[in-house]
Image (cartoon, coloured by chain):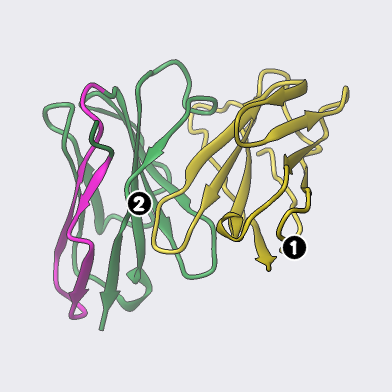
Chain colours: A green, B yellow
């Protein structure tokens, strides 16, 4: 079956532009996560959804970052007024269960590489 | 938060067994230990998960001592394709705003 897909794979934005990154999780997966990965670093948690409910957004670095999952499947991460420090790979992951995301296996997409000029 | 410490990098040769140790002194009672593998330009991929003692699957083994303050990922007979970054994850202490911490991982390089 299809895995997690993300689009676009690459995005170049000028500083100050708004961007929207899309994640298509594995069908039927309850949990969805967004991560930010800087070059040479591990992924850093941004936010977590259980179905359409955003249960944890404590990792979002500023109010310029906004995520939604309105129908409990596809999710969009939006970054407003992009800054150079937003340049990173944005990873999406989904998990079939909602029983505690510290232990659930997460299935990752390939990521979107955002470059802000 | 339960922090993990791993070696920054390791080198080995094809056909060797590779052991990567992760320290997690503040692991909580209900926390599991999970390892992920990440190749360049890809998202991390689940390798193995355990709570205590030993877990083995078709890819790797995970050894966890009784005190659970560390764990060792063992990759038998590595090949060039095992060159990747390996992350050890431990659940944090379970606050309402818990975060999943990957850390910087261990960059494993396999040589012919």
Compared to residue A30, the image places residue A39 above or below, namely: below
Residue A45 is situated, as x and y percent measured from the top left of the image, at 45, 46
Q: Which residue is mark 2?
A: A91
Residue B64 is situated, as x and y percent measured from the top left of the image, at 80, 29
Q: How many marks?
A: 2
Q: Horizontally, is A111 left or right of A8 in the view?
A: right
Q: Residue at x 28, y 24 (%)?
A: A29
Residue A6: within the magenta?
Answer: yes
Q: Residue at x 71, y 32 (%)?
A: B61
Q: Secondary structure at mark 2?
A: strand
Residue B5 is situated, as x and y percent measured from the top left of the image, at 75, 51
Q: Which residue is mark 1?
A: B13
- Tell me which segment is drawn in magenta: A4-28
Q: Quadrant of residue A57?
A: top left
**Mark 2 chain:** A
Within 10 angstroms of label 2, few (less than 14), some, or many (20 or more) residues? many
**Mark 1 chain:** B
Residue B81: within the magenta?
Answer: no
Compared to residue A52, the image places residue A18 above or below, namely: below
Quadrant containing the C terminus of chain B in the rendered view: bottom right
Q: Horizontally, is A36 left or right of A50 in the view?
A: right
């Amino acid at each position: 079956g299809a895995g997690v897909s993300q689009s676009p794979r690459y995005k170049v934005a000028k500083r100050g532009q708004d961007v929207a990154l899309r994640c298509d999780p594995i069908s039927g997966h309850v949990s969805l996560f967004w991560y930010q990965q800087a070059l040479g670093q591990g992924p850093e948690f941004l936010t977590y959804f259980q179905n359409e409910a955003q249960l944890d957004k404590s990792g979002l670095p500023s109010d310029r970052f906004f995520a939604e999952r309105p129908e409990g499947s596809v999710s969009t991460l939006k970054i407003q007024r992009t800054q150079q420090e937003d340049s990173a790979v944005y990873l999406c992951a989904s998990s079939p269960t909602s029983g505690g995301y510290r232990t659930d296996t997460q299935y990752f997409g390939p990521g979107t590489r955002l470059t802000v000029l | 938060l339960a922090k993990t410490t791993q070696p920054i990098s390791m080198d080995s040769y094809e056909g060797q067994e590779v052991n990567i140790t992760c320290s997690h002194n503040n692991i909580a009672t209900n926390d599991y230990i999970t390892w992920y593998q990440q190749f360049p330009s890809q998202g991390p991929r689940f390798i193995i998960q355990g709570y205590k003692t030993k877990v083995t699957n078709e890819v790797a083994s995970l050894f966890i001592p009784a005190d659970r303050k560390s764990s060792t990922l063992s990759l038998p007979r590595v090949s060039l394709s095992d060159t990747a970054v390996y992350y050890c994850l431990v659940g944090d202490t379970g606050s309402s705003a818990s975060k999943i911490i990957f850390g910087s991982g261990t960059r494993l390089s396999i040589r012919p």
